[in-house]
Image (tube, rainbow, N blue to C red):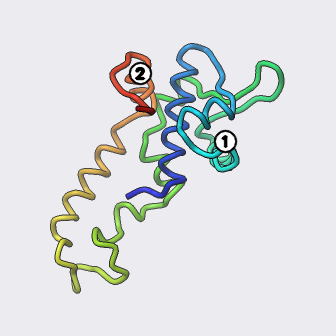
Amino acid sequence: MFSKACEYAIRATVHIARQSLDHDRASLLDISSEIESPVSFTAKILQQLVKAGIISSSRGKSGGFYISPLQMKETMVSDIVEFMDGDRVYTQCGLGLKHCSSAKPCPAHERFIGIRNELKEVLETTSVYSMANGLRDGITFLKR
C-alpha cells in the first residue's frame, strides 16, 4: 500500500515524537534500530522529513532529531504519506493495474473506492501525537 520509504518515514516520525514527549532527542542509529531500517536509507528519509518541516534536527553533543508537541498535534499521518508517496494510495488501482478507471474498472474497483476513502479519513484524522502517546503508554509498538 505505502512505499517502503513512506512506511519508514511514518515509523521514524512516530519514534521521534515518542522520544520528544520525554524531552529526548533521537539519534540516527537509535531511529534506524527502532524502525528496523538500514542506516543510510534512514538518513535519507530523515533528511527529507526535516526539509519538509515534519521533524527538526540539531547538531552537536545534545543534538538529534525531535518534534515539538505542537507540531506533533498538527501533523497528521496523511501529511507524511502525501509528502513521501503523493496521493497514489488514494488513486491507484487496488489490483495494481496501470489503466483502471470508472470507465474501465478492474474487478475490485468499486470496493476499493470505499476502502481508499476510509483509509484517507483514518490518515487525515490520526495525529503523530496520538500515535506517540500510544507508544509511550505501551498500547502500541513499532517493533515486535
- Quarter of the picture holding the C terminus: top left
Q: Number of labelled discs?
A: 2
Q: Residue at x 39, y 27 (%)?
A: 130
Residue 9 spot, x, y in % from top left: 54, 45
Within-10-Å neighbours for mark 2: few <14, some 14–19, many 20+ = some
Q: Residue at x 25, y 56 (%)?
A: 117
Within-10-Å neighbours for mark 1: few <14, some 14–19, many 20+ = some
Q: Residue at x 69, y 29 (%)?
A: 27
Amino acid on which the number 1 mark rests in the picture: Val
Residue 142 spot, x, y in % from top left: 44, 33
Amino acid on which the number 2 mark rests in the picture: Asn
Question: Which residue is tagged 2?
Answer: 133
Under circle 1, the secondary element is helix
Question: Which residue is tagged 1?
Answer: 50
Q: Which mark is residue 42?
A: none
Residue 91 spot, x, y in % from top left: 35, 67
Depth check: give the residue in front, 97 or 51: 97
Residue pushed farthest front? 144
75 up-or-down from 141: above or below = below
99 up-or-down from 132: above or below = below
Circle 1 or circle 2, nearest the eye: 2
